[in-house]
Image (cartoon, grey):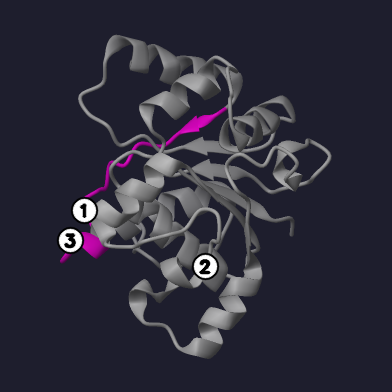
Amino acid sequence: MQPLVLAITGASGVVYGVRLLEVLVAAGRDVFLTISPAAQLVLETELGIKVDLARFSAEELLNRKRLEAATIDRYQRQIHYCHFQDLMAPIASGSFLTDGMVICPCSGSTLAAVAHAMGSNLIHRAAEVHLKERRKLILMPREMPLSLPQIDNLRKAAEAGAVVLPASPGFYQGPKSVDDLVDFVVARICDQLGVEHRLTRRWGV
């Protein structure tokens, strides 16, 4: 298995990205993680998580659920942090093989950069790499309502090969908590990546 790429950008709903990271490393996947400055602010606002983008520690994200120290140590070895300005990072090159990339959540400005190949940081570059190499790229927008330019950008991204997977949880499974709603969306992302999980029950099962 090749590693996966996860970018967390500055839209509301960073809990989806953090939960996805937890699920991916629990499934034994190596994850190349990058976080935008706007996402840094949203992490603190929405989850009370303070991350230092210059001196990043995965424990800041993983300790949200009070995992045992041995588990955190193991998970940290699977997370490879890349600063959003580091264009020399492995994920900036198509020669670095991955099994896909997820931008979760995907802000409107990040969407625009991806749709128009107008990148200015590592997140934009890595997304462009996945499109040009015909690898899986999943965009999870959460913003609403959508403006016409945003709708057009979603169309352009989809036409270029991206999978647009909005944060739209289903209710047929009888969710009991916000965590259940988050897990529904994360489960659909994992399905797209081919990562096994037991986050939700499937329709008709």
Give the answer, above or below, for where 77 lies relative to 81.
Answer: below
- Which residue position holds label 3? 174
Closer to the camera: disc 3 or disc 2? 2
The 10 Å Cα crowd at callout 1, few under 14, some 14 to 19, many 20 or more, is: few
Mark toward the start of the polypeptide (1 vs 2): 2
Q: Residue drawn at (74%, 55%), measured in percent from left and top?
A: 2
Query: What distance separates the C-alpha of mark 3 from that of mark 2?
Result: 32 Å
Residue assigned mark 1: 172
- Residue 182 appearing in the image: yes
Name the mark on residue 58: 2
Asked if the stretch drawn in magenta spans residue 131, the answer is no
Quadrant location of residue 167? top left
Q: Earlier in the sequence, mark 3 or mark 2?
A: 2
- Relative height, residue 166 to residue 25 (above, below): above
**Which quarter shows the N terminus?**
bottom right
Counting from the top left corner in percent of width and height, residue 6 is at 55, 49
Q: Residue 193 location, x and y as percent?
A: 57, 50
Q: Which residues are magenta?
A: 162-179
Whether residues under marks 1 and 3 lie with C-beta atoms below 8 angstroms apart, the answer is: yes
Q: Is residue 178 left or right of residue 148?
A: left
What type of secondary structure mainly makes up the magenta span?
A: loop
Query: Helix or strand or loop: what does disc 3 sit on?
Result: loop
Secondary element type, mark 1: loop
Q: CA distance from mark 1 to mark 2?
A: 34 Å
Where is residue 14 drawn, in percent x and y?
34, 50
Q: Could you tell me the amino acid type at mark 2?
A: Ala
Residue type highlighted by circle 1: Tyr
For the residues labelled 1 and 3, the Cα–Cα distance comes to 6 Å
- Do the numbered discs 3 and 2 sit on residues whose CB atoms are within 8 Å? no
Left or right, residue 125 beside residue 190: right
